[in-house]
Image: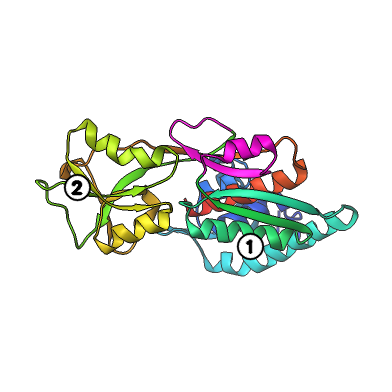
């Protein structure tokens, strides 16, 4: 087949290409499109074969657009936008009210991305968000107080699985703890597993500690850790700046991982909740 006989490009191939370009990662792009990584790889290879060019270069930073990929991206985005607009001509836009709950330990960029994407795509939906401890989210979903929530707990099997989160002992790199001194502990003071996790872990290995900081928010605990005042347990995505991980080599035991999931109320509008669940899943995979 010569260049004058080429078939029209399949929109699914362009959709996979745009997702890889946006996220720079095959695994994340596959999750966004609810496909396997191998299926996305096959689609990319097919598109490259049809066009006769390489669209990406692999680097330490992930999938980077080649010169040909840079040239194709705006065209592909325009095509997909036009197709979406055409499909929406005869469909009713989403509207209504949606109440969501998100953990306050969730990476800030995730929440910003979720709200930004959702508000842009569904301008007729009135979103109300609650950010805080997730321990009461399952009851809020059952009672109808929340429509969608991101729930997090060790061994959590509720709802739609998002990802497993590793939790770590964290400290300021400027204040490495003395092995022989009691651990200066920062405690998240709330009615959930986070409150007892640090004390329980240290009690098991009979390592002494002293509670020097209490807070009802992750932001407070993180500030105490960053300042060098205390040591505490945080999700591993909290490692930033001068905050470092303390492992068994420094006398700190492993702590339970948590499973994040999406909970959806059966009483809520399924079109609204599915749209929000999709936005949450895409953002979590992007920043995971």
Measured from the top left, where is residue 104 in percent x and y? 49, 52
Judge from the rendering whether residue 198 lies leftward or rightward of residue 32; answer left or right: left
- Residue underneath mark 2: 183
Residue 269 is drawn in which quadrant? Answer: top right
Q: Residues within 10 Å of mark 1 (few under 14, many from 20)?
A: few
Outermost residue to the right: 90
- Residue underneath mark 1: 116
Number of callouts: 2
The secondary structure type at the circle numbered 1 is helix
Judge from the rendering whether residue 99 lies leftward or rightward of residue 103; answer left or right: right
Measured from the top left, where is residue 60 in percent x and y? 38, 58
The part of the chain drawn in magenta is 134-158
Please check the rendered image and state whether residue 231 is part of the magenta-colored stretch, yes or no.
Answer: no
Mark closer to the chain start, 1 or 2: 1
**Looking at the image, which is closer to me, 104 or 190?**
190
Q: How is the image coloured?
A: rainbow
The residue positioned 44% from the left and 39% from the top of the image is: 192
Question: Disc 1 to disc 2, how far (Cα)?
Answer: 41 Å
Residue 77 is drawn in which quadrant? Answer: bottom right
* Residue 286 at least partly seen: yes
The secondary structure type at the circle numbered 2 is strand
Judge from the rendering whether residue 166 lies leftward or rightward of residue 21; answer left or right: left
The answer to whether 156 is drawn above or below residue 39 in the figure is above
């Amino acid at each position: 087949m010569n260049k004058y006989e080429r078939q029209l490009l399949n929109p699914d191939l362009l959709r996979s290409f745009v997702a890889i370009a946006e996220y720079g990662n095959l695994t994340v792009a596959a999750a966004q499109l609810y496909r396997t990584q191998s299926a996305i790889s096959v689609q990319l290879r097919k598109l490259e074969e049809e066009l006769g060019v390489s669209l990406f270069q692999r680097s330490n930073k992930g999938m980077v657009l080649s010169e040909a990929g840079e040239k194709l991206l705006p065209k592909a985005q325009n095509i997909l936008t036009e197709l979406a607009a055409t499909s929406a001509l005869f469909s009713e836009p989403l509207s209504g009210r949606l109440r969501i709950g998100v953990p306050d330990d969730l990476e800030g960029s995730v929440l910003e991305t979720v709200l930004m994407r959702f508000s842009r795509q569904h301008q007729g939906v009135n979103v109300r968000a609650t950010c805080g401890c997730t321990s009461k989210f399952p009851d809020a979903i059952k009672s109808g107080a929340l429509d969608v929530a991101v729930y997090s707990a060790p061994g959590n099997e509720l709802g739609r699985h998002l990802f497993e989160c590793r939790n770590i002992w964290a400290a300021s790199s400027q204040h490495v703890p003395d092995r022989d001194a009691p651990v200066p502990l920062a405690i998240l003071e709330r009615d959930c597993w986070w409150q007892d996790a640090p004390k329980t872990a240290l009690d098991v290995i009979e390592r002494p500690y002293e509670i020097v900081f209490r807070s009802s928010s992750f932001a407070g605990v993180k500030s105490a850790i960053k300042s060098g005042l205390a040591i505490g347990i945080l999700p591993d995505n909290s490692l930033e700046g001068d905050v470092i991980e303390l492992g068994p080599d420094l006398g700190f035991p492993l702590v339970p991982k948590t499973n994040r999931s999406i909970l959806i109320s059966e009483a809520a509008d399924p079109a609204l909740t599915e749209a929000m669940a999709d936005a949450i899943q895409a953002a979590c995979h992007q920043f995971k």
